Image (spheres, helix red, strand yellow):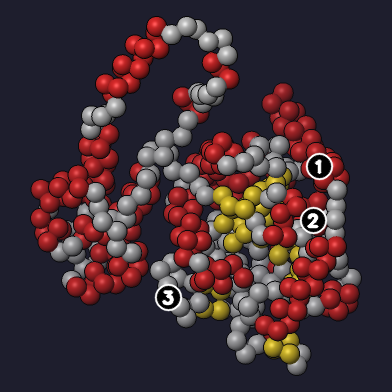
Amino acid sequence: MKLLLENWNAYIGKVPLNESQKLLLEKKHPILHDNGILELILESKCIDYKQQTALNIQNFYEDSISFVKKDILLEIIKNGIKEQEELPDENEDEESEEEEEQDDEEFDPFSHLKKFEIPEDDQINEDEDCVLFFGTTNKKLSYLNVTSFSLPAGYTCPFADICLSKFPRHGKKGDLKDYGEVRCFAASTEAAYRTVRERRWRNFDLLKRKSADEIGDLISKSIKEHERTKRGIQILRIHDSGDFFNQNYFDGWLQAAKERPDIIFYAYTKAIPFWKARKEQIPPNLRLIASRGGKADDQIEADFREATIVSGVEEAIEKNLNIDVNEFLAIFGEGDFALLLHGTQKKGRKIGDEKATNVARSNEETIKDAAEELDMPKWFIQKLIDKIVNAAREIQDNRLEM
């Protein structure tokens, strides 16, 4: 039992339950409490995520501990939340007094300008509505004000090959594994920053067992919440890390893109089979780029845009490809292009006579210098954005009229 608990703690982390959940579980199953399994239910603000953690616990223990049952754990979680919701509000009396005082106040014809109230149907309840995390992209994209969405590197990349790298969800220093020739930069980031890794895994937990419609609804709801609490979105990069891990997930993004023709969605992907299956349904505002170096390269069709990783400027010249240094070609371009190898590379790997890491560092300087030279006026960028979203809106309007 001790070994099992240690393994689980290493896998998911040890976070204490709240008191109402502890009391409820002690009353129902003292054996669970005595063995410390109570402490293994991950604390979270949203019900879906708590249920997922309960399922994780059940799966982890089912071969060794028969008395850990999914229905028991879910009941504890739900009842624990219910008990908290039924607690009396300490501010209730104060609010009643304030309402009485407000009745006596003179009517203010400009009161609607002081505080904007979101309609009840559109409000997000963090305890019941799990929302996905969106972040900002790196500095080279700051001129475009791009928002990004990420999943765990490697674990959500079923067609990755030359750039497949993984860092375990609860890994430690030295646990980063390379399975291909090129180290994935996103996996390196997860190894270096625990918070980044946790956010990506949480996104994956909320998506991986949902239907296409459920995924589409969750993405749309999460975008609205991000725009309400942080900033509006004009351009959204799907997968700063990760990839389309199954057809349902791909279809969910397809649905979200159709619902928001005012946003440009773009993604590099090696999941060519999922793209091919919906080739005729891709709206203009979903800009997909086939990323060479995957297991399904042979399925890339002639009219699919491609991005190829090159070791340096010379290789790009040989292949007659423009180098994208700031995502401009990915978002607004029409043809194929190259990406320079960058980031820390697999130890011992060489490109010609040089270490791969040294080549990558040199490329990073090239990317930085080129990106700084490109000073594109904002009106021109906005014109390109409008061109794409107007095409998407026109298609949506035609669809609604049918």
In the structure shown, which secondary structural element does the residue marked by tag 2 occupy?
helix
Q: Earlier in the sequence, mark 1 or mark 2?
A: 2
Q: Which mark is residue 137?
A: none
Q: Nearer the viewer, residue 159 or 42?
A: 42
Q: Position of residue 307 (x, y in %)?
A: 76, 65
**Label 3, on which residue?**
172
Secondary structure, mark 3, is loop
Query: Could you say where residue 75 lies in the image, as x and y percent from the top left?
Result: 23, 44
Counting residues from the N terminus, which is met first, the one under dot 2 or under dot 3?
A: 3
Is 74 on the left or on the right of 140, as rendered? left
**N-terminal label among 3 and 1:** 3
Q: CA distance from mark 1 to mark 2?
A: 12 Å
- Whether residue 38 is situated above or below residue 361 in the rendered picture: above
Amino acid on which disc 2 is placed? Phe
Dot 3 amino acid type: Lys
Residue at the spot 65% in from the left edge and 63% down from the top edge: 270
Q: Are marks 3 and 1 in contact (CB under 8 Å)?
A: no
Q: Nearer the viewer, residue 325 or 102?
A: 102
- On screen, residue 381 versus residue 44, left or right, reads right
Label 2: how many residues lie within 10 Å, few (<14), some (14-19) or many (20+)?
A: few
- In the picture of the structure, the residue carrying the numbered disc 1 is 382
Tell me which amino acid carries mark 1.
Answer: Gln
Q: Residue at x 57, y 57 (%)?
A: 150
Q: Quick check: can you spot residue 365?
A: yes
Secondary element under disc 1, as helix, strand or loop, is helix
Place of residue 98 in the rendered image (x, y in percent of width and height, measured from the top left): 35, 17
Asked whether disc 1 touches disc 2, contact meaning CB atoms under 8 Å apart, the reply is: no
In the depicted view, which residue is nearer to us: 268 or 375? 375
Please give the residue where the numbered disc 2 appears in the rendered image.
328
| Residue at 69 percent of width and 60 percent of height | 139
CA distance separating discs 3 and 1:
44 Å
How busy is the neighbourhood of tag 3: few (under 14 within 10 Å), some, or many (20 plus)? few
